[in-house]
Image: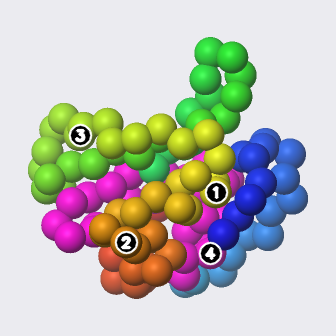
Amino acid sequence: MADYELSKDDPIVIPDDNDFSYSAIITWLRIGMTPRFWVNGNLYTIEIITSKAGNLELWLWANHTALDSSPFFERKFQTLADLESYEFVPGQTLSEIWNPDMLDTL
């Protein structure tokens, strides 16, 4: 689990185009991509947002279906560690349940 703050200055190694592992998804997120993935029938989107104070935050949105025009705001995270400790399924984090077939888009 990452224990660092989200930073624009972190060195990043770009994953291969066909790498949809959990670590690759976190890397794509860190460089500004917006991953969308399915968990138990909900489509989740994670965005990096710059707050009014200039800090980077992670916002988690959820849709009940891919056709929902109004996703609901699920949660805001200050660090990647906070996101990675969030239980998408009771008792299980995203890293514990991740499967590349869950990815919808980057």
* Residue located beneath label 4 in the image: 23
Where residue 44 appears, x then y in whole percent? Answer: 33, 55
Is the residue under label 3 in contact with that under label 2 (CB below 8 Å)? no
Q: Residues within 10 Å of mark 3 (few under 14, many from 20)?
A: some
Q: Residues within 10 Å of mark 4 (few under 14, many from 20)?
A: some
Amino acid type, callout 4: Ser
Q: CA distance from mark 2 to mark 1?
A: 16 Å
Disc 2 secondary structure class: loop
Where residue 39 appears, x then y in whole percent? Answer: 28, 68
* Residue located beneath label 2 in the image: 91
**Which badge, 2 or 4, is on the more N-terminal residue?**
4
Q: CA distance from mark 2 to mark 4?
A: 20 Å
**Which badge, 1 or 3, is on the more N-terminal residue?**
3
Front-lying residue, 65 or 60 = 60
Is 23 magenta? The answer is: yes
Amino acid type, callout 2: Gly
Amino acid type, callout 1: Ala
Front-lying residue, 27 or 97 = 97
Is the residue under label 4 in contact with that under label 1 (CB below 8 Å)? no
- Looking at the image, is 21 positioned above or below residue 34? below
